[in-house]
Image (spheres, grey):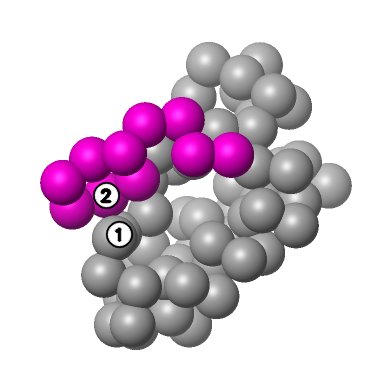
Amino acid sequence: MKASEIARKLKAQGWYIYQHGTRHDKWRHNKYKNGKMSILIPRHKSEELSPGVQAEILAAMNEIE
């Protein structure tokens, strides 16, 4: 899955960009770890995410549901 696809899914679920970085963006959701933790999404939108990164992001998204 590409970073742009993940970003679309995060936005649809209510996540927002908390901080822009040079290589990653930090995304937060008010229900994820009481709004104090963020997840990192790589900024290279067209490249495929590694399976480990993808699994961590999807796990965070599943915590919200």
Q: Please give the name of the residue rendered at 73% of the width and 27% of the height, measured from the top-left corner.
A: 31
64 or 23, which is in the foreground?
A: 23
In the rendered structure, find residue 24 and report the number of the disc placed on it: 2
Q: Is residue 18 magenta?
A: yes
Relative to 28, is 23 above or below?
A: below
Where's residue 10, x and y in %?
63, 55
In the rendered structure, find residue 42 and report the number of the disc placed on it: 1
Q: Residues within 10 Å of mark 1 (few under 14, many from 20)?
A: some
User: Given contact means CB atoms under 8 Å apart, are the residues at marks 2 and 1 in contact?
Assistant: yes
Which range is magenta?
16-25
Relative to 13, is 28 on the left or the right?
A: left
Relative to 62, is 1 on the left or the right?
A: left
Where's residue 6, x and y in %?
54, 67
Quarter-of-image position of residue 26: top left
Q: Please give the name of the residue rendered at 36% of the width and 67% of the height, measured from the top-left corner.
A: 52
Residue 27 appears in view: yes
- Indicate the amino acid at tag 2: His
- Indicate the amino acid at tag 1: Pro
Q: Furthest-right residue in view? A: 65
65 or 6, which is in the foreground?
A: 6
Task: From the image, give the main secondary structure of the stretch colored magenta.
Answer: strand
63 or 11, which is in the foreground?
A: 11
Relative to 54, is 59 above or below?
A: above
